[in-house]
Image (cartoon, helix red, strand yellow):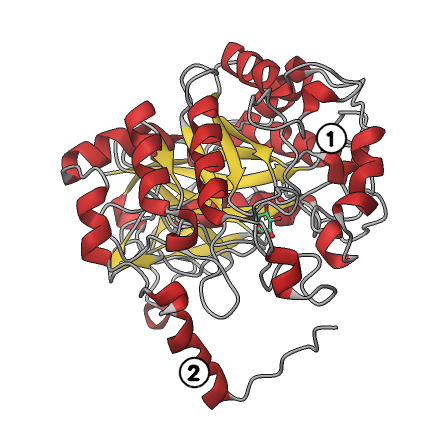
Amino acid sequence: MKTIKTYTISVLAAVTVASLFANGVTQSKSEDIAKKIPQETKEQYEKRMSWWINDRFGMFIHFGLYAAPARNEWMKNLEKLSNEEYEKYFANFNPDLFDAKEWARSAKKAGMKYCVLTSKHHEGFCLFDSKYTDYKITNTAFKRDLAKEFVDAFRAEGLKVGFYYSLIDWHHPDFTLDRLHPLWDKVKEEDFNKGRDMARYRKYMLNQVTELLTNYGKIDIVWFDFSYPGPDGKGRDDWDSAAIYSLAKKLQPHIIIDNRLDLNDVPGGTDFITPEQFNPSSWPKLNGKKYAWETCQTFSGSWGYHRDELNWKSTKQVIYSLVAAVSHGGNLIMNVGPTARGEFDYRAKRRLDDYAKWMHANSRSVYGCTEAPEKYERPEGTILTWNPKTKRLYIHLLYYPAGQLGIRFGKDIKYAQFLHDASEIKVALAGKEGAFCDKESGFDAHLFFPTVQPDQEVPVIECMMK
Ligand code: GLC
């Protein structure tokens, strides 16, 4: 039995250095990889990313066999299951109520502009008709190529489409044991790895990425997940990330790729950063510079459908996640985990309805918006977003002000209104119109509010700026 290894810092440091020489080679150097992957100018990058940066808001869908146990997409790992013990979920899988058009309508109504579907998660089960494996949805009672129906339905609703593809594969016969594998502390490494060949697995991944980016039309995003280099881990050399990245760009040159191929240090090696399950409190940087980024989050804790999970975020929390991301120049991709019948469950539907209601009236403060210029100091209890094209500043009220709100950019406002009903919000400059702006406060104006908060979870003031 493998004992749980406990590393002292010095041992861990030694092991980390040693792992860089795993299989007798060091981790490929950044500059060597940069020569292997396609490069583009800053202008070409910005043009390619422009729709994604404008649209700001996407839907993640985590769907697979793990919807059946319904207790987190990592349950095979958490419960240390072998392929044989996990087989029952494949044998009984049939999402008979699946309707891609319904999924697409829900995403569109919620104001989401793109959607990324797990084509294969860590369990190794494919939602697409791959000719390189039998472990796929077309070999279940469902029989159909779900990925095909997904791309067709979401495109028909005008959304961009993407595939999430797991680099990890706990089912594949060539995938070797590592510290995240379900059987890590249940089998002897040398016994488990006998006959397994990661070179064959790397070829399998290239073949499947070719299928996904050839057989399903224009794919706008590919979301690889994830690398864990270091002791008993897998990183860019284990995946041959340079080959995967180059192949994706060759097959679909416009495609946007995330940063989990372990190429963050490689120039041109990632299109966006992926802070997970939190809102950064400033614009994230890559190699010292502000960079495109998207926070990926869930309505509850689990990415896959979790029947018994009770920690569902409130309406205000999920709206906050979106506007807070935009306020620091980023995107939000919010996840839905459909049930094993193929439907969004009632709790997800409730949150999507909340997004639909709020975005119906307030999406102008999201689409095309970004971080507000520093000169507009953020009033207490608010979040600012800014549309540089229309020169409109959006004040999101996280707490509804009692009567007045002091601001320091009143002189720059031409006109202000509630965004949801375009009703005027009075801007009273200091010293005029009864604004209580004493000199000490430093406010140059007050915004006046009706006593009762409007029927908006997060009311927004739209300010037309000079
Ligand atoms: C984490 C989770 C994985 C999920 C991913 C989405 O890696 O472990 O299950 O697919 O986040 O970003």
Q: Earlier in the sequence, mark 2 or mark 1?
A: 2
Query: Of residues 100 and 234, which is closer to you in this image?
Result: 234
Residue where numbered disc 2 is placed: 13
Q: Residues within 10 Å of mark 1 (few under 14, many from 20)?
A: some
Residues at marks 2 and 1, CA–CA distance in whole angstroms: 47 Å
Horizontal side, residue 189 vs residue 342: left or right: left
**Could you tell whether 194 is left or right of 406 in the image?**
right
On screen, residue 456 versus residue 268, left or right, reads: right
Local secondary structure at mark 2: helix
User: Is the residue marked 1 within 8 Å of ligand 1, measured from its CB?
Assistant: no
Number of numbered discs overlaid on the protein picture: 2
Q: Position of residue 142 (x, y in %)?
A: 76, 17
Q: Residue at x 82, y 51 (%)?
A: 310
For disc 2, the neighbor class at 10 Å (few under 14, some 14 to 19, many from 20) is some
Residue at 54% x, 12% y is 152
* Residue 163 numbered tag: none
Residue 436 lies, in percent from the top left, at 43, 60
- Taking depth in this image into account, of 386 and 146 the one nearest to the observer is 146
Residue 156 can be seen in this image: yes
Q: Quadrant of residue 345?
A: top right
In the displayed structure image, the side of residue 363 where residue 96 appears, left or right = right
Q: Tell me the mark number nearer the camera, choosing from 2 and 1.
A: 2
| Residue at point 32%, 55% (across, down) | 264
Amino acid type, label 1:
Lys
At a point 62% along the width and 83% down the height, the residue shown is 6
The three-letter amino acid code for the residue at tag 2 is: Ala
Answer whether labels 2 and 1 touch (C-beta < 8 Å): no
For the N terminus, the quadrant is bottom right
Residue topped by disc 1: 349
